[in-house]
Image (tube, rainbow, N blue to C red):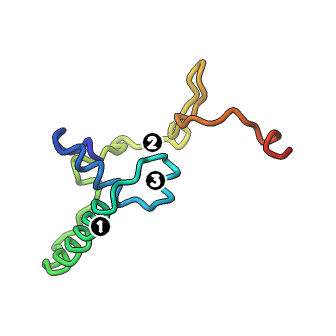
Amino acid sequence: MASWYPRPLAPLLRTATLALLDEHVLRAFRYAPPGAAATALVRRAVRTRGRLVRLLPPRRSPHFARQNREVKSYPDGYRVADLGTHPVPGLRGCPVRHRDTSAADTAE
Protein backbone atom coordinates (compact mmCIF):
# COMPACT_ATOMS: atom_id res chain seq x y z
CA MET A 1 0.00 0.00 0.00
CA ALA A 2 2.83 2.40 0.78
CA SER A 3 4.10 2.01 -2.80
CA TRP A 4 1.03 3.90 -4.08
CA TYR A 5 2.14 7.16 -2.48
CA PRO A 6 5.20 9.43 -2.79
CA ARG A 7 8.40 7.80 -1.47
CA PRO A 8 8.95 10.33 1.38
CA LEU A 9 5.62 9.28 2.89
CA ALA A 10 6.37 5.53 2.74
CA PRO A 11 7.75 5.13 6.30
CA LEU A 12 4.80 7.01 7.80
CA LEU A 13 2.30 5.02 5.75
CA ARG A 14 3.98 1.72 6.61
CA THR A 15 3.64 2.53 10.31
CA ALA A 16 0.01 3.58 9.83
CA THR A 17 -0.76 0.39 7.89
CA LEU A 18 0.84 -1.80 10.56
CA ALA A 19 -1.13 0.07 13.23
CA LEU A 20 -4.36 -1.08 11.57
CA LEU A 21 -3.42 -4.78 11.79
CA ASP A 22 -4.43 -6.97 14.72
CA GLU A 23 -1.74 -8.32 17.03
CA HIS A 24 -2.07 -11.91 15.79
CA VAL A 25 -1.66 -10.79 12.17
CA LEU A 26 1.49 -8.84 13.06
CA ARG A 27 2.91 -11.94 14.76
CA ALA A 28 1.93 -14.23 11.87
CA PHE A 29 3.80 -12.08 9.35
CA ARG A 30 6.61 -11.32 11.83
CA TYR A 31 6.11 -7.57 11.63
CA ALA A 32 7.39 -5.42 14.47
CA PRO A 33 4.32 -3.91 16.12
CA PRO A 34 4.09 -0.12 15.99
CA GLY A 35 4.05 1.81 19.23
CA ALA A 36 0.90 2.19 21.30
CA ALA A 37 0.74 5.91 20.52
CA ALA A 38 0.89 5.31 16.75
CA THR A 39 -1.78 2.61 16.98
CA ALA A 40 -4.10 4.83 19.02
CA LEU A 41 -3.57 7.82 16.74
CA VAL A 42 -4.22 5.85 13.53
CA ARG A 43 -7.32 4.14 14.89
CA ARG A 44 -8.68 7.46 16.14
CA ALA A 45 -8.03 9.02 12.71
CA VAL A 46 -9.91 6.19 10.96
CA ARG A 47 -12.89 6.61 13.30
CA THR A 48 -12.87 10.38 12.76
CA ARG A 49 -12.77 9.90 8.99
CA GLY A 50 -15.74 7.54 9.23
CA ARG A 51 -17.75 10.11 11.17
CA LEU A 52 -16.93 12.81 8.60
CA VAL A 53 -17.77 10.60 5.61
CA ARG A 54 -21.14 9.83 7.19
CA LEU A 55 -21.98 13.54 6.93
CA LEU A 56 -21.30 13.67 3.18
CA PRO A 57 -24.18 13.38 0.72
CA PRO A 58 -24.65 9.92 -0.78
CA ARG A 59 -22.92 9.12 -4.04
CA ARG A 60 -24.97 9.73 -7.17
CA SER A 61 -23.37 6.77 -8.91
CA PRO A 62 -21.46 3.81 -7.47
CA HIS A 63 -17.67 3.89 -7.33
CA PHE A 64 -15.98 0.54 -7.83
CA ALA A 65 -12.44 -0.37 -6.73
CA ARG A 66 -11.51 -1.21 -10.32
CA GLN A 67 -11.98 2.50 -11.15
CA ASN A 68 -9.04 3.44 -8.89
CA ARG A 69 -5.85 3.82 -10.90
CA GLU A 70 -3.68 2.49 -8.09
CA VAL A 71 -5.49 -0.86 -7.95
CA LYS A 72 -3.40 -3.38 -9.84
CA SER A 73 -5.79 -5.99 -11.14
CA TYR A 74 -6.19 -8.28 -14.11
CA PRO A 75 -7.61 -6.11 -16.94
CA ASP A 76 -7.54 -9.05 -19.37
CA GLY A 77 -8.90 -11.55 -16.88
CA TYR A 78 -7.00 -14.47 -15.33
CA ARG A 79 -6.93 -18.23 -15.03
CA VAL A 80 -7.06 -19.69 -11.53
CA ALA A 81 -4.16 -22.02 -12.38
CA ASP A 82 -1.95 -18.97 -13.05
CA LEU A 83 -2.55 -17.43 -9.61
CA GLY A 84 -0.39 -17.97 -6.54
CA THR A 85 3.24 -18.84 -6.04
CA HIS A 86 5.07 -21.07 -8.46
CA PRO A 87 8.08 -23.30 -7.80
CA VAL A 88 11.40 -21.87 -8.94
CA PRO A 89 14.14 -24.36 -9.89
CA GLY A 90 16.45 -24.77 -6.89
CA LEU A 91 13.99 -23.09 -4.51
CA ARG A 92 10.67 -23.97 -2.97
CA GLY A 93 7.56 -22.35 -4.45
CA CYS A 94 6.42 -20.50 -1.32
CA PRO A 95 8.17 -17.15 -0.66
CA VAL A 96 7.77 -17.55 3.13
CA ARG A 97 10.69 -19.24 4.87
CA HIS A 98 9.74 -22.46 6.68
CA ARG A 99 11.62 -24.65 9.12
CA ASP A 100 12.80 -27.91 7.59
CA THR A 101 10.49 -30.16 9.60
CA SER A 102 8.03 -32.61 8.18
CA ALA A 103 4.68 -33.64 9.62
CA ALA A 104 6.19 -37.00 10.64
CA ASP A 105 8.83 -35.23 12.78
CA THR A 106 6.20 -33.25 14.70
CA ALA A 107 4.07 -36.36 15.41
CA GLU A 108 6.90 -38.06 17.35
Q: Residue furthest top?
A: 90
| Mark 1 nearby-residue class (10 Å; few <14, some 14–19, many ≥20) | few
**Residue 14: mark in rendering:** none
Find the distance from the CA under tag 2 to the CA under tag 3: 30 Å
Looking at the picture, which amino acid does disc 2 mark?
A: Tyr
Q: Residue at x 22, y 68 (%)?
A: 45
Q: Quadrant of residue 52?
A: bottom left
* Quadrant including the C terminus: top right
Q: Position of residue 75 (x, y in %)?
A: 33, 43
Which of the numbered marks, if any, corresponds to residue 78?
Answer: 2
Tell me how far mark 1 sits from mark 3, CA to CA: 16 Å
Q: Which residue occupies the foreground of this view, 94 or 97? A: 97
What residue is disc 3 on? 26
Q: Residue at x 25, y 71 (%)?
A: 44
Coordinates of residue 70 in the picture (x, y in percent): 24, 46
Q: How many marks?
A: 3
| Amino acid carrying mark 3 in the image | Leu
1 vs 3, front mark: 1
Instruction: Name the mark nearer the viewer: 2 or 3.
Output: 3
Q: Amino acid at mark 1?
A: Ala
- Asked whether the beta carbons under mark 1 and mark 2 sit within 8 Å of each other, the answer is no
| Residue 71 x %, y % | 29, 48
Would you name the residue on which mark 1 appears? 40
Which of the 4 image quarters holds residue 38?
A: bottom left
Which of discs 1 and 2 lies nearer the camera? The answer is 1
Disc 3 is placed on an element classified as helix
The secondary structure type at the circle numbered 2 is loop
The first of marks 1 and 3 along the sequence is 3
**Of residues 4 and 47, the one drawn nearer to the viewer in this rendering:** 47
